[in-house]
Image (cartoon, rainbow, N blue to C red):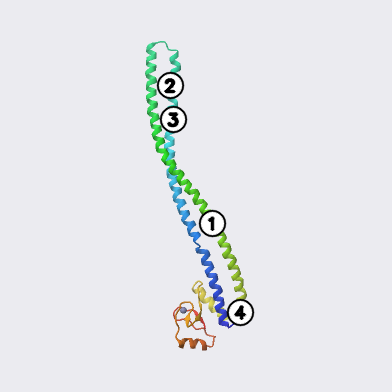
């Protein structure tokens, strides 16, 4: 293997590592989890608003029901007292009071019904939202588990290629590695070494002139030529 070939092989290994890092970073499950988290948070805000609204209505309902209970107690006491009354005037006054309490109770009970009618759709909406929240939590859990599995697979592949790289690195001439590293650090990784494949640059596809290819073949190999188009170091 020529020195330049082994530099191109180093690039191949690094390209694989770059691709694995990219795949690890951009796996579709991550975007899906983010989207679900956004939906869960919007849903949480809606649930809070509706719960607050329902809480106010339920408090009103309880207050009215308490008032009805007081009236019922009062009616029971009044009825009790009527048994010991003998004066027709007193009895008649008591009947009036009972009738008045009955009317008040009806008004309150109507109001309770109205509140219950307002509460019911809120409860339905809430349980729908909560059901969706549960599904989101399940789906998020499933995706996160899939991410863990995919990460482990990628990491195993990275470990294997890294160890190949470690074995391979000493076979590349030191000054070439230095130049390679410098170019890679400038571009934050990426492809900096290309091959000439059927007269084309393997990195960008530029077709080289036959003069250039001749020059490349006869260059003394200590000075690497670069692709005019994309700047990669060329291995003939
Ligand atoms: Zn090129």
Task: Work out how far the residue at label 3 is from the one at label 1, CA to CA, in angstroms.
Answer: 48 Å
Which residue is denoted by mark 4 in the rendering? 171
Helix, strand or loop status at disc 3? helix
User: Can you name the residue that lies furthest to the top here?
Assistant: 86
- Expressed as whole percent of the image width and height from the top left, the position of residue 9 reads 56, 77
For the image, the number of numbered tags is: 4
Q: Earlier in the sequence, mark 3 or mark 2?
A: 3
Mark 1 vs mark 2, CA separation in Å: 62 Å
According to the image, label 1 marks what residue?
144
Residue 109: x and y in percent read 40, 29
Of callouts 3 and 4, the N-terminal one = 3
Nearer to us in this view, 70 or 130:
130
Q: CA distance from mark 3 to mark 4?
A: 88 Å
| Cα–Cα span, label 4 and label 1 | 41 Å
**Residue at x 46% of width, y 17% of height:** 80
- Residue bearing the label numbered 2: 75
Residue position marked by numbered label 3 in the rendering: 65
Distance Cα–Cα, label 3 vs label 2:
15 Å
Looking at the image, which residue is at 47% across and 81% down? 200
Name the N-terminal-most of marks 4 and 1.
1
Q: Quadrant of residue 116?
A: top left
Residue 125 horizontal side relative to residue 217, left or right: left
Q: Quadrant of the N terminus?
A: bottom right
Q: Identify the residue shown where x is 58% and y is 62%.
A: 152
């Amino acid at each position: 293997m020529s020195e330049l070939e082994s530099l191109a092989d180093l690039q191949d290994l690094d390209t694989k590592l770059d691709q694995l890092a990219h795949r690890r970073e951009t796996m579709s499950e991550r975007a899906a989890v983010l989207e679900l988290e956004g939906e869960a948070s919007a849903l949480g805000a809606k649930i809070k608003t509706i719960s607050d609204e329902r809480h106010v209505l339920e408090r009103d309902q309880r207050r009215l029901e308490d008032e009805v209970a007081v009236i019922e107690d009062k009616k029971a006491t009044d009825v009790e007292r009527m048994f010991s009354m003998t004066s027709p005037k007193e009895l008649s006054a008591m009947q009036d009071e009972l009738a008045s309490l009955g009317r008040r109770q009806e008004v309150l009970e109507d109001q309770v019904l109205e509140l219950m009618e307002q509460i019911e759709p809120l409860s339905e909406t809430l349980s729908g939202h909560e059901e969706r929240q549960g599904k989101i939590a399940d789906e998020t859990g499933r995706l996160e588990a899939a991410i863990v599995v995919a990460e482990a697979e990628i990491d195993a592949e990275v470990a294997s290629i890294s160890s190949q790289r470690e074995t391979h690195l000493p076979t590349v001439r030191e000054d070439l590695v230095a130049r390679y590293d410098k170019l890679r650090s400038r571009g934050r990784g990426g492809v900096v070494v290309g091959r000439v494949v059927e007269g084309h640059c393997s990195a960008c596809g530029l077709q080289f002139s036959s003069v250039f290819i001749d020059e490349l073949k006869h260059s003394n190999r200590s000075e690497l030529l670069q692709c005019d188009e994309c700047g990669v170091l060329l291995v003939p």
